[in-house]
Amino acid sequence: MDISKHILNFEKLPIKVQKQIINFIDNLISKYQMNHIESDKKLKKSKFNFDWEGKLKKDAEKFSSVELQHKANDLRG
């Protein structure tokens, strides 16, 4: 896209219309940024971390996998 052509056409427009176009662009940018922020928040919430990995190795002989599953279900409520 050749933006210089659009800039020349923009400059030919009356000031009032130029202001409307600028406001429209500002609104689009705000909308995009808000959607981008919301999608980032959703992505951060949906990421699962594995910081617990390997923490139960020392207790492996104490509990069976089934017992751990039951305990996990109890903790979830």
Image (cartoon, rainbow, N blue to C red):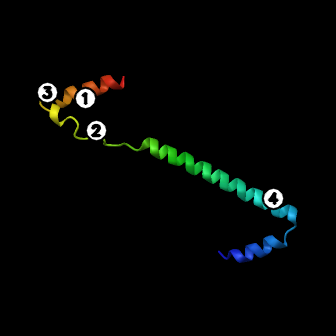
For badge 2, the amino acid type reads Trp
Label located before the other in sequence (3 or 2):
2
Q: Report if the CB atoms under discs 1 and 2 are less than 8 Å apart.
A: no
Identify which residue is drawn at 77% across, 56% down: 23
Which residue is under mark 1?
Answer: 69
For badge 3, the amino acid type reads Lys
Specify the label residue 61 is tagged with. none
Q: Give the x, y percent position of residue 48.
A: 37, 42
For badge 1, the amino acid type reads Gln
- Indicate the quadrant where residue 6 lies: bottom right
Q: Residue furthest left?
A: 61
Q: Of the residues tagged 3 and 1, which is closer to the observer?
A: 3
- Neighbour class for label 1 at 10 Å: few (<14), some, many (≥20)? few
- Neighbour class for label 4 at 10 Å: few (<14), some, many (≥20)? few
Which image quarter holds the C terminus?
A: top left
Q: Of the residues tagged 1 and 2, which is closer to the observer?
A: 2
Identify which residue is drawn at 11% across, 30% down: 61
Label located before the other in sequence (1 or 4):
4
For badge 4, the amino acid type reads Gln
Q: Is residue 63 left or right of residue 24?
A: left
Q: Report if the CB atoms under discs 3 and 1 are less than 8 Å apart.
A: no
Residue 59 in the image: above or below residue 54 = above
Which residue is under mark 3?
Answer: 62
Q: Give the x, y percent position of residue 53.
A: 25, 41
Label 3 SS: loop
